[in-house]
Amino acid sequence: MPLHKSAEKRLRQSERRNARNRSRKKELKVLVKTMQKLIDTSAEKAVVEVAYRSAVQKLDRLGVKNYIHANKASRKKSQLTRLMNSYVKAD
């Protein structure tokens, strides 16, 4: 328990920020898993492309705003692109 008023405020701020970070990372995880699930179920190319674009867009945004490291965002985008390209070639 914080003893000072400023420490209490920092604790409140920290809890809010942690919740915000968790929700943004969870959104990203859901987008990536949705795309992979669509590929596994052999969905239409257009649907998979929309999921791919939204996942890449979210990765870019989170990388720029430092919610995840820029290199991690780049690595994930590369993995998704390879997955997408292999799916398109398979059809």
Image (tube, rainbow, N blue to C red):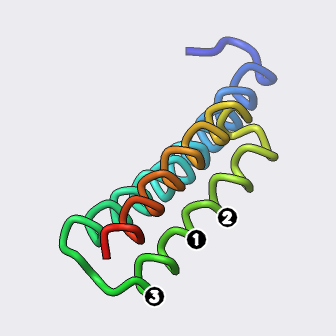
Q: Who is closer to the viewer here, 14 or 39?
A: 39
Mark 3 surroundings within 10 Å by alpha-carbon count, few (fewer than 14), some (14 through 19), many (20 or more)? few
Q: Who is closer to the viewer here, 14 or 66?
A: 66
Q: Is the C terminus in the top left, top right, bottom left or bottom right quadrant?
A: bottom left
Residue 32 location (% of width, % of height)? 42, 57
**Mark 3 or mark 1, earlier in chain:** 3
Quarter-of-image position of residue 12:
top right
**Amino acid tagged 1:** Ser
Secondary structure at numbered mark 3: helix
Residue 24 location (% of width, % of height)? 57, 53
Judged left or right of residue 88, residue 72 is right
Judged left or right of residue 27, residue 37 is left
Q: Residue at x 67, y 12 (%)?
A: 3
- 24 to 69, vertically: above or below: below
Secondary structure at numbered mark 1: helix
Q: Who is closer to the viewer here, 43 or 51?
A: 43
- 72 to 77, vertically: above or below: above
Q: Residue 46 carries which label?
A: 3
Secondary structure at numbered mark 2: helix
Q: Which residue is drawn at 69% across and 31% down?
A: 71
Residue identified by numbered label 1: 54
Q: Residue 40 carries which label?
A: none
Callout in the foreground (3, 1): 3
**Amino acid tagged 2:** Gln
**Mark 3 or mark 2, earlier in chain:** 3
Q: Which residue is drawn at 33% across and 87% down?
A: 44
Residue identified by numbered label 2: 57
Residue 39 location (% of width, % of height)? 29, 68
- 70 to 21, vertically: above or below: above
**Structural distance between the alpha carbons of marks 3 and 2:** 16 Å
Quarter-of-image position of residue 61:
bottom right
Q: Which residue is drawn at 31% across and 68% down?
A: 90
